[in-house]
Image (cartoon, helix red, strand yellow):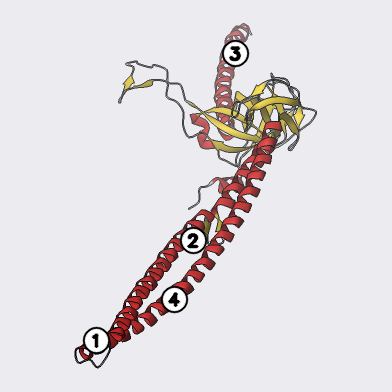
Amino acid sequence: MENSQNDSPGLSLKNRILLGRIIGIAIVLGAVASGALVWHINYQNPRTNDAMVRANIVGIAPEVSGRIVELHVQDNQYVKQGDLLYVINPQPYQAKLDKAKAELLLAEKDVDSRRASSGSAEMAIERLEHQRAAANAEVKKIEAEDEYLHNYLERLEPLADKQYVTTDQIKQARSRYAASRAELADAKAKELSARSAIEEAKSDSRRAVSLVAQVGDVNARIEAARALVTAAELDLEYCYVRAPFNAYVTNLNTREGEYAKAGAQMFALVDDRQWYVIADFKETYLQSIKPGQDAEVFLVAYPGKRFRGVVTGIGWANSPDNIKQHGVLPEVDRTLNWVILASRFPVRIEIKEHDPAHPLRMGMTAFVTVLKATTDAAVTALPPS
């Protein structure tokens, strides 16, 4: 009886030791299983708290310079596409437009006048051609008469020695021949003058056609004047600056009376059409992230509010922090890293929900979880073959 009582403490101690060992092994196995489960979940559904809400920022700058005479928005105001933001003094540009329109009318009148002058030159050339033809006919007629008188004189002169003709007849024949020669010279001079007048008229006609500047169905002078009118109309339209899309006004620090320079940004618009999150994931998670996957986005500003998102892209480049470029050769630091840190790459996630009760603001801190890719999403994410 005493022996059985003495053996009980020994058995109880062994049982406690065995139980402790079993519990310890169970704790280790549980920790390993929990770690494996967490590792599996993290790689199946990558998660990061290094994320920020972003939106596209567009600087609003005028196309023309001038003094602001109307300002229709305030800082942080919501505007819709087409809303008038501000007006630059349009009076100088209205004057330029009026001047351009007047110059267009003058150009059209001048072209019409030159076209009429060109037509008159063509008619003058035609008239001179008739005069030249008449002069040429007159020359030929006189040449025929001159030849006849010359031959007649040559027949009379031998007869004078034999006294078959009188001296007066010879003198009369010579006088008529001399007059014919003079008349022939005058006719040739008139023909030559007609030819010169025709060449001058043709030169004037070509000059008139050149000044008209007609190329096919297009008149260069009129088109140039119309282009000036169009440019003036655009400048006048640019005086009225409107919102190109739905957005929020930000960084507005100006009022009426300030002089705006063309191309100089006056303020910025936060594009409200598309909001997205830039989430920096470790490179070890990139194998589990594909474009088209769904994502859950939680914002620090709205605890418990979940936003649905879709992965739209993964960054292809990252700036190295251990290589510096000086000249043509890279400068690499001689360091020994005992701990290797995984690089992070930006993942762009478009937010698909717009809740007026929970407005988004650029710069909000976000927590992002990329959900496991479905079969359809994986097929969509594959590059085309």
Q: Measure how far apart labels 2 and 1 are at the Cα level.
A: 50 Å
Q: Nearer the viewer, mark 2 or mark 1?
A: 1
Mark toward the start of the polypeptide (3 vs 1): 3
Q: Position of residue 51 (x, y in %)?
A: 60, 25
Quarter of the image where one finds residue 100: top right
Q: Nearer the viewer, mark 4 or mark 1?
A: 1
Q: Amino acid at mark 2?
A: Ser
Q: Nearer the viewer, residue 229 or 246?
A: 229
Q: Which residue is mark 3?
A: 16
Tell me the number on the disc at residue 154: 1
Q: Are marks 4 and 2 in contact (CB under 8 Å)?
A: no
Report the amino acid beneath label 1. Answer: Glu
State if disc 1 and disc 4 touch (CB < 8 Å). no
Q: Which mark is residue 15?
A: none
Where does the N terminus fall, quadrant-wise?
top right
Q: Which callout, 3 or 2, points to the residue nearer the camera?
A: 2
Q: Residue at x 56, y 61 (%)?
A: 217
What amino acid is labelled 4 in the image? Answer: Ala
Is disc 1 placed on a helix, strand or loop? helix
Q: Secondary structure at mark 4?
A: helix
Spatial CA span between label 4 and label 1:
32 Å
Query: Which comes sooner in the sequence, label 3 or label 2?
Result: 3
State if disc 3 and disc 4 touch (CB < 8 Å).
no
Q: Residue at x 60, y 43 (%)?
A: 228
Q: Which mark is residue 133?
A: 4
Residue 243 rendering spot, x and y as whole percentages: 71, 34
